[in-house]
């Protein structure tokens, strides 16, 4: 794990999203949970998560999906299935 990746993991308690973000993520991933932030935290902290940072965002690839997180505000912007 690179130091920058650790920064996201170390600040998981700051992770949040907007009401529209919850709706968008649930729709994009067909999630059957109301705790979207909790689901994202668990996915990001999983052993198979691949975390990269490009510019102002982190991109977390895990379990066939990509979670986009703003690197400064720790806002989950969106999440979607990986395109194959």
Image (cartoon, rainbow, N blue to C red):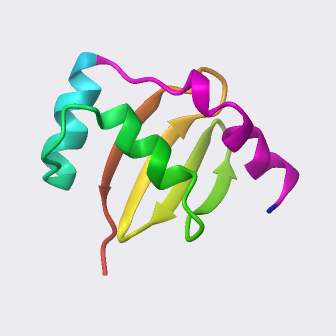
Q: Residue 59 appears at what percent x and percent y?
A: 54, 52
The residue shown at (52%, 27%) is 15
- Residue 37's x, y, as percent? 38, 33
12 or 26, nearer to the observer: 12
Q: Is residue 68 left or right of residue 6?
A: left
- Chief secondary structure of the magenta span? helix
Query: Looking at this rendering, what residue extends furthest in the right direction?
Result: 3
Image vertical order of residue 26 relative to residue 63, above or below:
above
Quarter of the picture containing the N terminus is: bottom right
Question: Which residue lies at the image location 59% right of the left edge and 26% below the top edge?
Answer: 13
Q: Residue at x 60, y 33 (%)?
A: 12
Quadrant for the C terminus, please.
Answer: bottom left
Quick one: 45 or 28, which is closer to the camera?
Answer: 45
Q: Position of residue 36 (x, y in %)?
A: 30, 36
Q: Is residue 55 highlighted in magenta?
A: no
> Was residue 7 drawn as part of the magenta stretch in this picture?
yes
- From what the image shows, is residue 74 above or below residue 30? above
Q: Position of residue 64 (x, y in %)?
A: 35, 71
Q: Quadrant of residue 55?
A: top right
């Amino acid at each position: 794990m690179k130091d920058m990746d650790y920064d996201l993991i170390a600040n998981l308690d700051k992770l949040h999203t907007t009401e529209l973000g919850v709706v968008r993520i649930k729709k994009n991933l067909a999630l059957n949970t109301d705790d979207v932030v909790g689901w994202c935290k668990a996915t990001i902290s999983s052993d198979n998560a691949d975390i990269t940072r490009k510019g102002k965002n982190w991109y977390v690839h895990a379990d066939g999906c990509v979670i986009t997180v703003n690197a400064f505000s720790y806002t989950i912007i969106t999440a979607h299935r990986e395109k194959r």
